[in-house]
Amino acid sequence: MKERVISGIVIAVVLIGVWFFFINTIVFDIFFSALGAAACFELTRCIGLKNKFMQGVAIVFSFVWAMGLVYPSVCPLSAVAVLYVIFLALMTVTNYPDITFEHLAGTVYASIVIPTAFAMSPIIADLYKTFTFLDRMECKFFIWYVVASALFTDVFAQLSGMAFGKHKVTPNLSPKKTWEGCIGGVVVVFFLNLLWYFLYVKFFATQPFGLPLWFYCLMSPFMSIASMFGDLIASLIKRNYDIKDYSKLIPGHGGIMDRFDSVIMVLPMFYAFISIYGSVVA
């Protein structure tokens, strides 16, 4: 537990530092693209992909893919994706049975789906360039709001479950998760999000927020629930391959996928809702 707490503090300091000092810069973009590449490494290893050349190409592609989503004018993403998938298919066919269809499907998920989720962070931070009703400081708040919602839901769901948990949610998949814990996580994070909102508006915002308070209140439980599903999907993959952690990169926590599994689900969902609101309501 001591190791886990110390690692948690280090993670928090790094995330807050990157958010506070480097948001809307290429450092911020590289940071989240690198998280996607690290997650790709963990997942390809998890699924048993032993072909180092294919794994190496997948890791490099995952980083390039994430950066390309952030800077679409620089990289012809469609062409690169087509060539990459063809490469994976050829590698699978020419190296069967060392590389199976399961490896192919898992590598596509690891190198495209997961990095896309991480790339949503710098994309969300730049939404003020797309929607005129947003400004840079509100988009900066988005990142705190989304990442904190995911991570704190995990923390308070665990604490609530330890204190009040009796009824299992998915006993075969994640036996420690309880309905009482899930409800506790959603409720506590809802009030924390209200606190973040009012503090940020009072001390950091340079103009009134473009999104109404009701939108943030509505999004909070959605994000908490989505973060739990992200955690369950990551647990499903681990159960499928009978592993405890994706890696030992973060002492006491496991790997990038172990620590950021909930964020991976929440970032794309928040981006989708903002885009819908900006296109339909605003």
Image: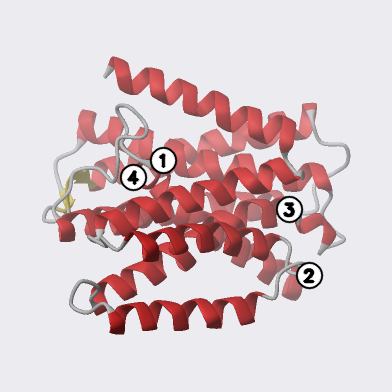
Which residue is at the far top?
A: 2
Q: Which mark is residue 183?
A: 4
Look at the numbered disc 2 and give the secondary structure of its residue: loop
Residues at marks 2 and 4 touching, judged by CB atoms closer than 8 Å: no
Look at the numbered disc 1 and give the secondary structure of its residue: helix
Tell me: 130 left or right of 155: right
Q: Which mark is residue 153?
A: 1
Tell me the distance, in whole angstroms, between the alpha carbons under discs 3 and 1.
Answer: 23 Å
Q: Which residue occupies the foreground of this view, 227 or 203?
A: 227
Give the amino acid type for the residue marked by disc 4 in the picture.
Ile
Residue 282, by quadrant, is bottom right
Tell me: 41 left or right of 81: left
Residue depicted at 50% across the width and 46% down the height: 35
* Residue under pointer 2: 73
Tell me the distance, in whole angstroms, between the alpha carbons under discs 3 and 4.
Answer: 25 Å
- Please say if 115 is above or below 168: below
In this view, the mark in front (1 or 4): 1
* Residue under pointer 3: 212
Q: Which residue occupies the foreground of this view, 96 or 281?
A: 96
Q: Which residue occupies the foreground of this view, 212 or 16?
A: 16
Tell me the distance, in whole angstroms, between the alpha carbons under discs 1 and 2.
Answer: 36 Å
Residue 78, by quadrant, is bottom right
Give the amino acid type for the residue marked by disc 1 in the picture.
Thr
Give the amino acid type for the residue marked by disc 2 in the picture.
Ser
Disc 1 crowd rating (10 Å Cα; few below 14, some 14-19, many 20+) is many
Q: Earlier in the sequence, mark 1 or mark 4?
A: 1
Give the amino acid type for the residue marked by disc 3 in the picture.
Pro
Residue 255: x and y in percent read 35, 40
**Residue 223 appears in view:** no
